[in-house]
Image (spheres, grey):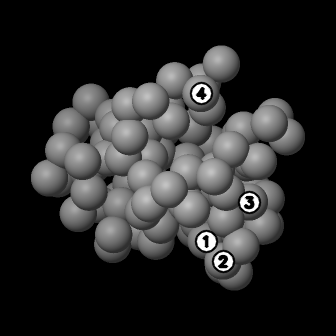
Amino acid sequence: MNKVLNNLGLCLKAGKLCHGADSVIEGIRSKKVKYVFLANDAADNTKKKITDKAKFYSVEVNEEFTSLELSNAIGKSGRMVIGITDENFLKILKK
């Protein structure tokens, strides 16, 4: 679990992720986002928007981390949603 969070920071530095609900939704629509991390303590409205969009475009959603864990992993405060845009980083994160 900690390994996944550490790799999210690397993914950000490499420019292979987007964060924030609007940015991730746009990434899902444009088929750039391959995988989504959604904070398990996100607001119900945010969860519904993200999961509905992800389901429609067949993008997997992971809800195992809190917003604090996700925010700390990428060094940005208040992040509820992170989208992974690179297949190779996705393979590393799913190991």
Label 3: which residue?
73
Residue type highlighted by circle 1: Arg
Tell me the distance, in whole angstroms, between the alpha carbons under discs 2 and 1.
7 Å
Residue type highlighted by circle 3: Ala
Residue drawn at x 41%, y 68% is 21
Task: Report x, y in % for residue 75.
Answer: 71, 73
Pick out the residue farthest to the right: 2
Task: Report x, y in % for residue 17.
Answer: 45, 56
The tag on residue 79 is 1
Tell me the distance, in whole angstroms, between the alpha carbons under discs 3 and 1.
10 Å
Residues packed near mark 2 inside 10 Å, few (<14), some (14 to 19) or many (20 plus) = few
Residues packed near mark 1 inside 10 Å, few (<14), some (14 to 19) or many (20 plus) = many
The relative height of residue 68 versus residue 78 in the rendered view (above or below) is above
Q: Quadrant of residue 66?
A: bottom right
Foreground of the two, 69 or 39: 69
Q: Quadrant of the N terminus?
A: top right
Q: Are marks 2 and 1 in contact (CB under 8 Å)?
A: yes
| Circle nearer the N terminus (3, 1) | 3
Label 4: which residue?
92
Pick out the residue farthest to the left: 30
Please identify, in this view, whether the residue under mark 4 or under mark 2 is nearer the observer.
4
Tell me the distance, in whole angstroms, between the alpha carbons under discs 3 and 4.
15 Å
Residues packed near mark 3 inside 10 Å, few (<14), some (14 to 19) or many (20 plus) = many
Label 2: which residue?
76
Residue type highlighted by circle 2: Lys
